[in-house]
Image (cartoon, grey):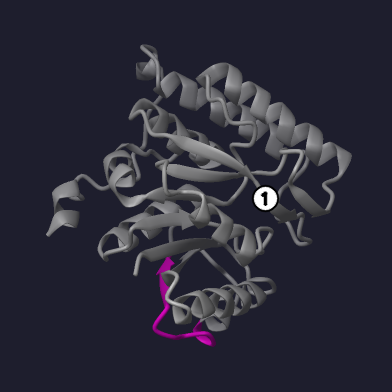
Amino acid sequence: MEKLSIIIPAYNEEARIGRTLEQYLAFFKQKKKQKIVDVEIIVVLNACKDKTLEVCNKFKCKELKILNFEQGGKGFAVVEGFKEALKGDSNYIGFTDADMSTPPEAFYDLYANIKDVDGVIANRWDKNSKISVEQTLLRKIMSRGFNVIIRTLFIIPHRDTQCGAKLFKREKLMIVLPKLGSSEWSFDVDLLFYMRREKAKIKSIPTTWNDEKGSKINIKKTPIKMFLSAVRLRLVHSPLKFIVRVHNIMPEKFKIHNLLK
């Protein structure tokens, strides 16, 4: 039976992650019982100041791993989750948001579509996607505007680079992982950029998605941060990279051959 690792980065998610874990664990335990796919869920807490850890501990089981770090940032958390998953024998490794904007059934669709490609990402803007709670007009403009910038700067074909549901095959992820940097708001772009560089076949599929309440995005400050992060990332991947002081979140001692032992 194939094995699937699902990484959930979490920053101060005490109010939302309980429902996410309850539904994801129940859904994928049933898939395991049906001998469709084995699963492990890796929650990566990054700089949490609330009771997220206490909530996660209530769901402790064989299928759940909890990592707790003082360092913050989605990119850092996902990379640490990737590293943990690669220590095991998972065939497919992906991540989703702690607020369950992507329900477990929709994440399973990623797995069901990955057989002939290297990765599958959810696309909220596909005409066949089911968006049960619509984004506000301002957030739509912000999201789509950022995507236009990304597609222009990086020539990435995907219409929705920022949706928090992505899944990749182990082999390609092992190649890309040591190259990922701490790109903050542009982590997903950095990941897809390197996947493209490695000639990975990435498929974009329609999804079911909810714009959950309790978002920590600051509508006034976030667009500026996203734009500056994208420009910084473009400089990093250009002959002008000397302009940017690049901080790599992959420790030098972490070598890919350690994952093969």
Is 251 part of what is drawn in magenta? no
- Coordinates of residue 26 in the picture (x, y in percent): 57, 80
Residue located beneath label 1 in the image: 207
> Which residue does the image show at 46% across and 82% down from the upper left?
33
> Which residue does the image show at 28% across and 47% down from the upper left?
171
- Coordinates of residue 246 in the picture (x, y in percent): 37, 31
Q: How many marks?
A: 1
Is 64 part of what is drawn in magenta? yes
> Which residue does the image show at 66% across and 76% down from the upper left?
19
Q: Quadrant of residue 98?
A: bottom right
Question: 8 or 181: which is nearer to us?
Answer: 8
> Which residue does the image show at 31% across and 57% down from the upper left?
83
Q: Is residue 20 above or below residue 170?
A: below
- For the record, the magenta segment spans 57-69
Which image quarter holds the N terminus? Answer: bottom left
Residue 246 placement, left or right of 152? left
Residue 253 placement, left or right of 89? left
Q: Is residue 201 above or below residue 217?
A: above
Q: Residue furthest right?
A: 137
- Coordinates of residue 76 in the picture (x, y in percent): 43, 51
Confirm whether residue 110 shows in the render: yes
Q: What element does badge 1 sit on?
A: loop
Packing grade of label 1 (10 A; few <14, some 14-19, many >=20) is many
Amino acid on which the number 1 mark rests in the picture: Thr
Which image quarter holds the C terminus? Answer: bottom left
Q: Quadrant of residue 142?
A: top right
- Coordinates of residue 116 in the picture (x, y in percent): 41, 43
Q: Is residue 136 above or below residue 215?
A: above
